[in-house]
Structure formats: structure tokens, C-alpha cells
Amino acid sequence: MPNKKQDFIDQQLQDLNNDGVDRRGFLKCMAWAGTGLVWTMSGGIPVSRAFAKGYGKDAGKGGDFSFVQISDSHIGFNKPANPDVTATLQTAINKINAMPHTPDFVIHTGDLSQLSKPSEFDTLDQVLKGASAKQIHFVPGEHDMLSDNGEQYLARYGKGTKGSGYYSFDHKGVHFVGLVNVANLKAGGMGSLGHEQLEWLEDDLKGRSASTPIVLFAHIPLWTIYPDWGWGTDDSEQALSYVKKFGSVTVLNGHIHQIMQKVEGKVSFHTAMSTAFPQPAPGTAPSAGPMKVPADQLQRVLGITDVNYVISGRSLAIVDSPLADSGTAASQNGVGLALGDSARG
Amino acid sequence: MTRKTLWITGTATPVLIAVLVLLAGSRSVRASDQASAASAAVKIDNFVFGPQTITVPVGTTVTWTNNDDIPHTSVSTDGVFKSKVLDTDEKFSYTFTKAGTYPYYCTIHPKMTGKVVVQ
């Protein structure tokens, strides 16, 4: 049964924001690999629209800052799904460098390597060195903590972090939290944050004003996408309970090598494409293993995510951009929009 | 592991052969391996241990083979055995010298679980 009083309040809020978007309910928005999508978050009210061929010209304009998310580089992977993952990572970096605005930083949401080998990390470092954005924030994927409890990852990418590699930082009024949900995984379970990290998170967020925009990022999705394939985090609900008071929460994940989005109240969830190889849509294949696509299609299902934050409007716009030319990729758009085309710029 | 195998060969072979005779026809035991020690295979395909439950006699060496394009591990939930990370086509073997039930999982993809029952 709908709650009339709540609906009324929501209507008022909606009118205040004057964006013509119904913020109630559980909104699901999925866009499969290879698509482009912009969504804007304004005062906790998310709207979205497909990005068209013009992406690149206006992205980042008028924004107070932007950053880029890349994910799942799997350096060292050499199977038919993509025999040259270093080259596609390089293409991703070239794409970042070709942006009209230099992003303030890059977030890598894990699976830097395929087998946590020093040589793989070395190659990654070499490619990332060429990025226009010099600051890169990492969280580990399960492939980065394979045989040494993540010691090597922590030594290279986790300096100054807590526990298994979690940390937070502030940037131009936005609070960013990098979480680790790939350590000490339990038999039969999915991703896990663990008690110690959850306590730290609660403490980290406690004193902050509800108007502070929050960005949480972690490797495995912090929402349950497909439990059979372990695409979720067992204790994510606990973590999300700590961000309830905030007006604008964005959750960025990787791991599933395809774009998926969900908006629930003031929390917007988003997963990024991989720079290495695509994975099948949930339940459409016998397993979550690498998906082979024709070589000329590969760069349409790999990509980067550009996040543009506008302080004046308290909005956050996310543009997923495949590695292939945006013109080519835009023609592939089959974006499933829950919210329609009504985004303000 | 080598030491365990030697120990089995040296002292337990008669017992093993007796067990193997009793279990003749059991699908989990390869007759051709009776001369040294019993062995059994678990294949990792499409993020699944197959067979998920394998029943073997005491002394059997179980070998896991990863047929996926993605690395996996085979790690005892109770800390009894632990493979290194198995990349594509890599193998891990462990010899079970005591009866019991040994649940295990892939520490990288913990939804992947299996069980070795040693009788």
C-alpha cells in the first residue's frame, strides 16, 4: 500500500527540485555492456539519459570537478576473450587523456592483475604512468590478493590504508570511501567487508554532515546482483545503513565487467565496464567466465566511466564510455532507462 | 605431500589394496592406479567443482584440475589442505590419509564449494 503522507512529502520534494522525476520507489536501470549513459544526481534525486554521439565535447564542462573510474584490467590475462589486455588498458588511458578536461583523479575499482604477479603489477604501473591524471586511488579485487593475503597489493597500492586496504579521503567537498570486500571470503558466501571494516566505516561517516555527498567504491558490487555467481556483498546492507542520513550517495563497483545501475532512494549504484574482457549478463551463461566476442566488437564492451560533479547543483553525472569510438558505440546504444530522458544538463 | 605418499606406499599398501578390492567398481577409484595408490579427479569447469561431492577410500590422492580461463583455488574449509592459485590447466593434489568429510571451497570465488568424503 502506498504511504500517502510520504508520497505527499515526496511530491513536494520533487516539485522543489523541479526535475519532473518521481523519486519514489525502487528504480532499476540496467544498461548492458557497450552502452553509454549519463546520469545526474541532484540533491539525492537521480535522473538519467543516454549519451549521444556528442559525448566528449560537453562532458565535464561546467562541472566543478570530474574523476574517472576504470576497473578490471586483469593485466596478465591472455586467453581468447582478449589476448592483449595491456593494449586495451592503454586504449582506456588514451581515452582519458583525450578528454577535454583533465580529471582530478582516477579510481581503479580492482582486479588490476590476473594473478597478483609482480610483473603484472609492474606492467599496470607502467601503463597508468601515462595517464593525464596523476592521482590514482585503488581498491583491490580478488585477483589482486591471490596468494599473499594482499601483502604485495598493500605494499604497492595501499600505503596509509587501514586493515585490508580501506580508506577515505575528501575532495572538494565530496567524501570518498574505498572499501575492500575481497579479503577473507567465507566458503559459500559472496563478497564480504567484515566486522572490523564496518566498524571503521561507521566511525568514518559518523561526524559528517548529511549534506556531504558520499561516494563509496569497492570491487564487488555492494548490492546483490546475482547471488548464484557471487555478485554481491554479504554484509553490504550493514554498510549502507551507515549512509542513510546522507542526501547524496553514489556507489561505484566493478567485478562484473558490464554496466548495471540501480537507484534506491538517495543511493545510486553503478558498475563499470572492464578494460580487459566482458562477462555475460547474469544467468545467461553457464558461468561468469570471460565472454568471447568477435575481435572487432571487443572495444565496444570495454570502457571507462567519467564522473562529473557539479557543486552548485549538488549533482553528479556519470558517463560510461566504451573504448570504441563513441560514434560507433552510440549507435549500439540500447540503454534501459528507468527514468527517461528528462535529465537536466 | 611426497612424504605422505611415501608413507602410504611403504606401510599402507596392503590395506589400501584390500580397500580397493572391496570398493571395486566404485566410480571414484581408477583401477589402473591401484599399483601405487588410489587416485581420483575433480575437474573445475565453469566455476563448479565436479563432482561436487567425491567419495574415496582412505589413502586416495585427489587431483583438482582447473579447466577455466579464470584462476581458482581448492582450500579446505577446516584448514586441512590448501592449493596454490591454479591458473588454467594447473593441478593440485592432496592425499587423504584419514577418514572423514572434508569440505573445501575456492577462496577467490567462495560460492564454489565441494566436499571430499574419505571412508
Image: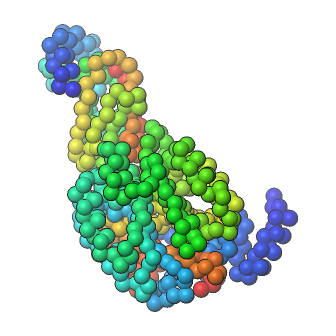
> Which quarter of the rendered picture does the C terminus of chain B lie within?
top left
Circle count? 0
Rendering quarter of residue A71: bottom left
- Viewer-nearest residue: A135 or A130: A135
Question: Image point 42% across, 65% down: which residue?
Answer: A137
Q: Residue B115, image x and y in percent?
A: 39, 30
Q: Residue at coordinates 49% horizontally, 57% vertically from top-left? A: A167
Front in this rendered view, residue A33 or A141: A141
Decide: is A13 above or below B57.
below
Q: Is residue A199 left or right of residue A104?
A: right
Left/right placement of residue A174 relative to residue A19 reads left
Is residue A73 depicted above or below A162 in this figure?
Answer: below
- What residue is shown at x 46% (from left), y 90% (from top)? A57
Q: Is residue A342 left or right of residue A55?
A: right
Viewer can see residue B89: yes
Residue B15 in which image quadrant? top left
Q: Is residue A295 above or below residue B113?
A: below
Q: Residue at x 31, y 34 (%)?
A: B82
Query: Residue B74 placed where, x, y %?
Result: 33, 37
Residue A21, given in percent of the width and then of the height, sits at 70, 76
Question: Residue B5 at x, y = what percent?
Answer: 19, 21
Colour style of the rendered protein structure: rainbow
Up-down relation of residue A155 to residue A43 (above or below): above
Side of A236 where B47 appears, left or right: left
Q: Is residue A37 visible?
A: no
Give the camera-side residue of A270 and B99: A270
Quadrant of the rendering where the N terminus of chain B is positioned? top left
